[in-house]
Amino acid sequence: MQRRERTRHLIELGGLVQKAGLVDLTDDERATILGGLLELADRLQGEGGAALGEVWRRRGLRAFEVDAVAAE
């Protein structure tokens, strides 16, 4: 059961990478995508990271809302 939940979680995270357009923007270059994610992690750990994380969270919530409205 835990393995199934972990697999679903990983698939959902991959979907977020796709939803953000990173697959197309990088021509599916996984090293570039990983590099970008590492940069994101560095910024979150740095000074002002909590505030930046909140900005990104709100932007993500708005994107989910737009998708939900479009799906109606």
Image (cartoon, grey):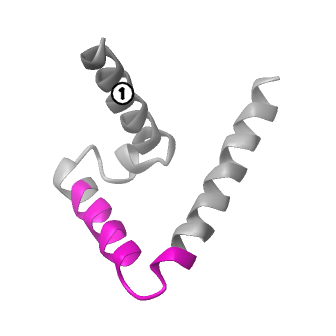
At 75% across and 25% down in the image, what residue appears?
71
Q: Is residue 50 magenta?
A: yes
Q: Residue furthest left?
A: 31
Quadrant in the picture for residue 10: top left
Name the side, left or right, on which 51 lies relative to 63: left
Spot occupied by residue 26 in the image (x, y as percentages of width and height):
31, 53
Name the side, left or right, on which 53 lies relative to 61: left
Which part of the image, by quadrant, shows the N terminus?
top left
- Mark 1 is on which residue type? Ile
At 35% across and 44% down in the image, what residue appears?
23
Q: Which residue is mark 1?
A: 11
- Crowd around label 1: few <14 · some 14–19 · many ≥20 (10 Å): few
Q: 25 above or below 54?
A: above
Q: 4 above or below 21?
A: above
Quadrant in the picture for residue 59: bottom right
Q: Residue furthest bottom?
A: 47
For numbered disc 1, what is the local secondary structure? helix
Spot occupied by residue 11 in the image (x, y as percentages of width and height):
36, 27
**Magenta segment range?**
34-51
Spot occupied by residue 45 in the image (x, y as percentages of width and height):
35, 76
Q: Main secondary structure of the magenta part?
A: helix
Name the side, left or right, on which 12 lies relative to 27: right
At 61% across and 53% down in the image, what residue appears?
60
Q: Nearer the viewer, residue 3 or 14?
A: 3
Q: How many numbered dots are placed on residues in this image? A: 1
Name the side, left or right, on which 62 lies relative to 7: right
Quadrant in the picture for residue 46: bottom left
Which part of the image, by quadrant, shows the C terminus?
top right
Q: Is residue 60 magenta?
A: no
